[in-house]
């Protein structure tokens, strides 16, 4: 399986990092080795001094598809969860400055926290584009988002990405982070909520 992550999909987050709002979706990949195992804490890597949390709604692909039309994209997922796209912001800045790929900053081991539970979309009457989510750091809300604020809705993301690569059953789509990203410190505890339900709780070491 692969993890597809969308960058700059919320205007206020693009602005907080000094980035322009993109004219078309921006995506990158994490390998399956990036998945964080729930029984472990998240260990800060020794090669970065600036690891950031980014809470994101995660969609799980449930059908094989390529070149999917936007109007059919909703048939390719029926469950939703929440995750963290951990990012080495210092390394990412270095990669951006050099025009290099972002893998060192984004695709490292355990950089993808994924909720243990995925929820049937049918449980949410508001649909995929009306989901509220938050991230708490040590019990304080640091990020609040709603999928209605996405620049590119999930169906457009699926259509766009599947023009370039086949989507497979079990692939995960991280749909971008809202404003409020920030640095994590040893001893922090990060807890994510989707529509008020706790999806993960990650101690940082
Ligand atoms: Zn992200």
Image (spheres, helix red, strand yellow):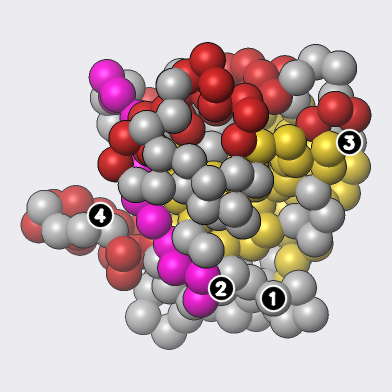
Work out how far the residue at label 3 is from the one at label 2, CA to CA, in angstroms: 25 Å
> Residue at (40%, 39%) from the top-left corner?
66
Instruction: Bin the neighbour count of mark 1 within 10 Å (Cα to Cα): few under 14, some 14-19, many 20 and up.
Output: some
List the residue tagged with mark 4.
93
Q: Are marks 1 and 2 in contact (CB under 8 Å)?
A: yes
Q: CA distance from mark 4 to mark 3?
A: 33 Å
* Label ID, residue 110: 2
Q: In front of the other: label 4 or label 2?
A: 2
Say whether disc 1 or disc 3 marks the residue closer to the N-terminus. Answer: 1
**Residue 25 shown left or right of residue 62 in the figure:** left
Q: Residue at x 31, y 64 (%)?
A: 103
Q: Pick whichever of labels 4 and 1 is earlier in the sequence.
A: 1
- In the rendered image, residue 172, in percent from the top left (x then y), is placed at 57, 51
First reached walking from the N terminus: tag 1 or tag 2: 1
> Which segment did they paint magenta?
22-33
- Please tell me how crowded label 2 is: few (under 14), some (14-19), or many (20+) other residues with Cα within 10 Å: many
For ligand 1, tell me if the residue under mark 2 lies within 8 Å: no
The residue at 55%/32% (across/down) is 178
Label 3 belongs to which residue?
Answer: 196
Cα distance in 3D space between marks 1 and 3: 23 Å
Q: Is residue 23 magenta?
A: yes
Front label number (1 vs 3)? 1
- Quadrant for residue 141, please give it: top right
Pointer 4 local density, CA inside 10 Å: few below 14, some 14–19, many at least 20: some
Q: CA distance from mark 1 to mark 2?
A: 7 Å
């Amino acid at each position: 399986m692969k993890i597809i992550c969308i960058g700059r999909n919320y205007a206020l987050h693009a602005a907080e990092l000094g980035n322009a709002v993109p004219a078309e979706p921006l995506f990158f990949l994490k390998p399956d080795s990036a998945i964080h195992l729930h029984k472990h804490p998240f260990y800060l890597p020794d090669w970065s001094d600036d690891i950031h949390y980014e809470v994101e709604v995660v969609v799980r692909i449930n059908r094989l598809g390529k070149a999917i039309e936007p109007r059919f994209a909703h048939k390719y997922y029926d469950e939703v969860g929440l995750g963290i796209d951990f990012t080495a912001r210092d390394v990412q800045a270095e990669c951006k400055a050099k025009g290099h790929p972002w893998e060192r900053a984004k695709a490292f081991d355990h950089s993808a926290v994924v909720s243990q539970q995925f929820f049937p979309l049918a449980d949410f009457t508001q649909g995929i584009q009306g989901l509220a989510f938050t991230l708490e750091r040590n019990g304080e809300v640091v990020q609040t988002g709603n999928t209605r604020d996405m620049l590119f809705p999930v169906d457009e993301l699926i259509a766009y990405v599947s023009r370039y690569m086949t989507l497979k059953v079990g692939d995960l789509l991280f749909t971008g982070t809202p404003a409020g990203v920030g640095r994590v410190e040893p001893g922090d505890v990060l807890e994510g909520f989707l529509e008020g339900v706790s999806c993960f709780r990650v101690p940082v070491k």
